Amino acid sequence: MIPRLVEHPWELSPAEARALQEELAGRVERSDRLPAVQRVAGVDVGFEEGGRVTRAAVALLSFPGLELLESAIARLPTRFPYVPGLLSFREIPAVLEAMDRLRTLPDLVLCDGQGIAHPRRFGIACHLGVITGLPTIGVAKSRLVGRHREPGPEKGDWTPLTDGEEVIGAVLRTRRRVKPLYISTGHRVSLQSAIHYTLACTTRYRLPETTRHAHRLASG
């Protein structure tokens, strides 16, 4: 079972959820505290029955070989409304349920969503990491907050994502001349390591293999 280092209610008002994000953001560790990475997981979430059911998927891959080792899906009733910036309250209960079904713990989790590249520096990757203690990375397909220059055209090119004077992530080209991804620290992973592991998990496609496997499962 995935550890729970933090327990809190999930059925909160949006105002209560924002206050909890601000409180828990202080627990995010932005420097490396990783084991030797041998297993990487991807998590993704979809919805069924017009949004009434949350369907979470987790895929566990070997590293660096990226062979699929196991996967799990969980479905739970959706209990939090769609509110930008608060998606973790809508999605994480089902994610935790899916991760509990894995036989082996991952060493690192790549989340389809934001880490600290978030208005309150507490996106879904941070939230999942603080709850479980697992190292996490936010790998988002779009920007939620911050400014950046366009990165170079080649795979591995990146530019900082900044909010005011603070660097909150990287805008990373994962495939030549395709739209970049927005990478940020989730928990216990530095930005440089987040870039490194995202690229190491990416093969011929824009998205890392972790995300691609999880997305197929979450989408049904």
Image (cartoon, rainbow, N blue to C red):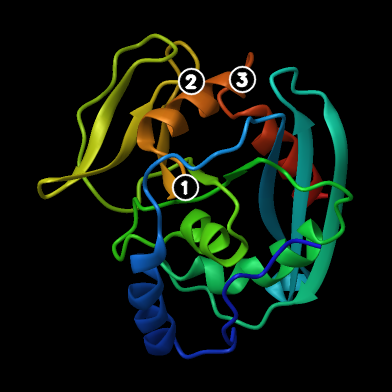
Q: Secondary structure at mark 3?
A: loop
Is 72 situated above or below 191? below
* Contact between labelled residues 1 and 3, with CB atoms less than 8 Å apart: no
Residue identifier under label 3: 205
Q: Position of residue 91 (x, y in %)?
A: 63, 67
Give the class, few, some or many, for how many residues have Cα within 10 Å of label 1's Cα (few <14, many ≥20): many
Give the Cα separation between the discs numbered 3 and 1.
26 Å
- Of residues 181 and 193, the one nearer the viewer is 193
Is 17 situated above or below 188? below
- Checking the image for residue 174, the label placed there is 2
- Front position among marks 1 and 2: 1
Give the Cα separation between the discs numbered 3 and 2.
8 Å
* Contact between labelled residues 2 and 3, with CB atoms less than 8 Å apart: yes
- Front position among marks 3 and 1: 1
Is 16 situated above or below 41? below
- Of residues 148 and 21, the one nearer the viewer is 21
Q: Earlier in the sequence, mark 3 or mark 2?
A: 2
Mark 3: amino acid: Tyr
- Checking the image for residue 141, the label placed there is none
Q: Position of residue 154 (x, y in %)?
A: 39, 9
Q: Secondary structure at mark 2?
A: loop
Give the Cα separation between the discs numbered 1 and 2.
22 Å
- Of residues 34 and 165, the one nearer the viewer is 34
Mark 1: amino acid: Arg
Q: Earlier in the sequence, mark 1 or mark 2?
A: 2
Is 104 left, or right, of 12 in this rendering?
right
Q: Measuring 30% from the left and 66% from the top, which residue is drawn there?
A: 120
- Checking the image for residue 188, the label placed there is 1
Mark 2: amino acid: Thr
Q: Position of residue 33 (x, y in %)?
A: 49, 43
Q: Measuring 43% from the left and 51% from the top, which residue is drawn there?
A: 115
